[in-house]
Image (tube, helix red, strand yellow):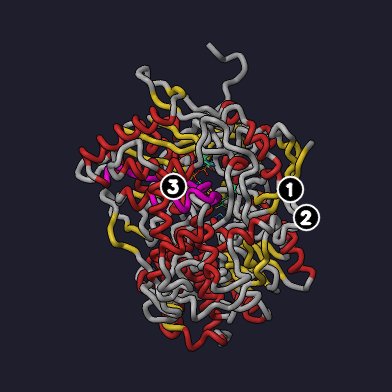
Amino acid sequence: MSRTAFRTCPLCEATCGLELTVEDDGAVTRVRGDEQDVFSHGYVCPKALSLPQLHDDPDRLRTPLRRNDAGELEPCTWEQALAAIDAGLRGVQERGGRDAVALYIGNPSVHNLSAPLYGRVLAKALGSRNVYSASTVDQYPKQLASALLFGGGLTVAVPDLDRTDHLLLLGANPLVSNGSLMTAPDVRGRLRAIQRRGGRVVVVDPRRSRTAEVADEHLPIRPGGDALLLAAMAATLFAERLVRPGRLTPHLSGLDELRELLQPFTPELVAPAVGIDAATIRRLARELAAAERAVVYGRMGTTTQTFGTTASWLIDVLNVLTGNLDEPGGAMFPLPATGGANVRGTPGSGRGARVGRWASRVRGLEEVFGELPVACLAEEIETPGEGQVRALITLAGNPVVSTPNSARLDAALASLDFVVSLDLYVTETSRHADVILPAPSPLERSHYDIALYGFAVRNVANYSPPLLPLPAGLQDEWRTLLALTGIVTGQGPAIDVDALDDFVALELVRRDAADPSSPVAGRDPQQLLAALAPRRGPERLLDAMLRTGPYGDHFGAAPGGLSLAALEAAPHGIDLGPLEPRLPAALRTASGTVELAPQRVVADLPRLEQALAEAEAEAGGAERPMVLVGRRDLRSNNSWMHNLPLLAGGPGRCTALLHPDDAARLGLRDGAPVRVRSRVGEIELPAQLDDGIMPGVVSIPHGWGHGVDGVGWRRAAAAGGVNANLLADELLVDPLSGNAVLNGIPVALAPVAVEPVGSAG
Ligand SMILES: Nc1nc2c(c(=O)[nH]1)N[C@H]1C(S)=C(S)[C@@H](COP(=O)(O)OP(=O)(O)OC[C@H]3O[C@@H](n4cnc5c(=O)[nH]c(N)nc54)[C@H](O)[C@@H]3O)O[C@H]1N2
Ligand SMILES: Nc1nc2c(c(=O)[nH]1)N[C@H]1C(S)=C(S)[C@@H](COP(=O)(O)OP(=O)(O)OC[C@H]3O[C@@H](n4cnc5c(=O)[nH]c(N)nc54)[C@H](O)[C@@H]3O)O[C@H]1N2
Ligand code: SF4
Ligand SMILES: [Mo]
């Protein structure tokens, strides 16, 4: 007999519903899209189909590993593993203080219920300034810009895809990535629908991506040119009296200052730097203003560049100026079922952005939202002195492949006194660990997208119980995170995890009860806790968040409202409706307005003018270096799914895409090896000629190059490819957010001399 089960795919931000067929012996024999899913309606991509292979992967860890006296990783019991961690971390804390232990949190922790809830508990307990994450090689500039404009780093406006008539998309390829900071299953279908209702999709990207191919217009841009393009578009709106913020007008500040600040950025002046002519820039601005419902959206290409925060800020500035912020069909703020910081507190104002409370020890990069930029992790490990990092905990991350100047970080990790990794595999990163703690497979854990529903293009909620029981040897990741919490707070390796969990849950409801803006304000925390019984772990916390959230049953005070039980009874999810306007109530700026001219960004505008001057000088003759950008492909997931036959196979995808004119100039041939060199490193890989990429630009995907000593993913190691982050320069960051520059890295290309046949001596 077989059974059918439904669950949300945890592999990317799209949150698709899956229908799985499970045999009596636990084998998952079929995966397909859940036609009845309230959000994805049956859509899936090839990654979801690989879930059974991920589950069955013989290389996936099923017991803890610890390093033995011979220096090899060997299986051990949880007791042994935790005892080794206790000894290792405590030693480092005693010698070097709290900051000596660093934490790196990777991307899959966002696609997980335990990690965000209990990772936060661990981070807080650790009490270290050295907290890092994949967010600073990703979306931090967008979050910072959002915090400066609206007062909260999670108050991110997302494109209302299903109602817009005009989508201007910069530096994103959602047909392949399936969307980011825009949770929307089946982006292709949603873009087609825009076109079917007579709307337009315009893509700005140095490369003719899959998304650019289906768009109505593709405009190649010089990497890093987005802030200048957007500034000139905004300046055009002012110059042509097209600024119409509409309903938001009384809630804006800094509009006049903005007009002054943007004046220097005329379309004529920015055109050479941007690579788009002045007439087109004006047209883009006019089209945006003319469309009934329009939205500007930017992703990786706009955030992981030197003007990441400025470009992200200008995207929402354009949405405001054209009257499209917080309006249907424009850029809107989701209202997730678990609530969030912009739901609680005084509606309409708050503390504003929290940044710069401390700085990194070596380079002085500022803290943003409690984290330091991962681009400075290696130097914090290498540089002696007070506060030097001597131990590292990695949670669902592979920074050795995913962050800039990989070779330097790789060497730095090897020099640490102690490393603990929570991971599914022995990776390029976890191979440095003294202890690796395994996590359950995605089919062995429950799931709810706490983070991603905050970026969804519709308000939805969907909970998935575990599909398969935990096998002996594995434990839930929240238990592991609480055990580590006990260790880093000096309570030893044998802490009572359930007691600590009771404490965490009580703290949550206590805070709720003490919060005047909470629907359970003033109620008895013990009673609230009792009402959550017998749930524990992430289910208990999730239930509390749902019940006190904007759609919640308020612990009985709002009968019929949402709770975890309601979600359990709805395996295809619950649709909570289209996005609704949320301003000014969702604002948490100190002024209680949308702060259009935030000081942090304004103070950096001279740097943008400087870039203009440099581009002018270059146009005057100096030869421009080639610049490196990244790309993703459908059958990949950052660095970690190349061990699965369904995703690893096929022709080599790790190639250097470049324009035939550049190839001719540089003496490079299609398929022949090319050497790519940056300030920090050098790699060799096959060239792939493509007239869809802008001359002067070379595109290389990240996440490859697993063939290094000691990794446990054998198929990945044999899959070929090279690590693009051997080229990414850790000194190149967006200075406002500290986020790494992964798009727009100066490189030099040369053919690899092939030894003539017979010349070998
Ligand atoms: N050059 C370049 N570099 C980039 C990018 C780029 O575009 N170009 N993109 C950047 C972006 S956007 C991101 S998000 C980062 C990603 O950076 P990271 O998050 O550091 O790297 P991942 O490749 O996602 O590795 C995730 C790790 O988590 C493990 N894992 C998976 N699921 C679980 C789980 O449930 N529990 C635990 N404990 N572990 C799990 C996997 O085995 C893997 O080792 O890479 C960044 N790096
Ligand atoms: N299949 C697959 N899906 C994924 C992932 C994956 O690895 N594989 N990773 C997931 C993660 S962690 C994330 S964060 C998202 C990212 O999602 P996206 O941002 O949609 O994906 P990217 O492919 O990085 O798209 C960036 C685009 O920016 C372009 N670009 C480069 N430089 C510039 C520039 O200066 N200006 C402009 N305008 N464009 C530029 C690139 O050519 C590329 O097409 O994808 C997620 N989904
Ligand atoms: S698009 Fe993302 S969420 Fe949907 S099936 Fe593919 S990997 Fe899973
Ligand atoms: Mo990402």
381 is higher (above) or lower (below) than 754: below
Q: Reply yes or no: does residue 504 show up in magenta.
A: no
Q: Report the number of discs.
A: 3
From the image, state whether disc 3 or disc 1 is nearer to you: 1
675 or 742: which is nearer to us? 742
Left or right of 44? Residue 260 is left
Q: Which mark is residue 402?
A: none
Q: In the rendered image, which residue does mark 3 sit on?
A: 105
Which residue sits furthest top?
Answer: 761
759 or 670: which is nearer to us? 670
- Cα distance between the residues tagged 3 and 2: 34 Å
At a point 38% along the width and 70% down the height, the residue shown is 514
335 is higher (above) or lower (below) than 499: below
Badge 2 vs badge 1, beta-carbon distance below 8 Å? yes
Q: Which residues are magenta?
A: 99-121
Q: Which mark is residue 19?
A: 1
Would you call the spot at circle 1 few (<14 residues within 10 Å), some (14-19), or many (20 or more)? many
Q: Earlier in the sequence, mark 2 or mark 1?
A: 1
| Residue 159 pos. (x, y %) | 61, 68
Q: In the rendered image, which residue does mark 2 sit on?
A: 35
Q: Point out the image quarter for the N terminus.
A: top right
**The disc labelled 3 sits on which kind of residue?**
Ile
**The disc labelled 1 sits on which kind of residue?**
Glu
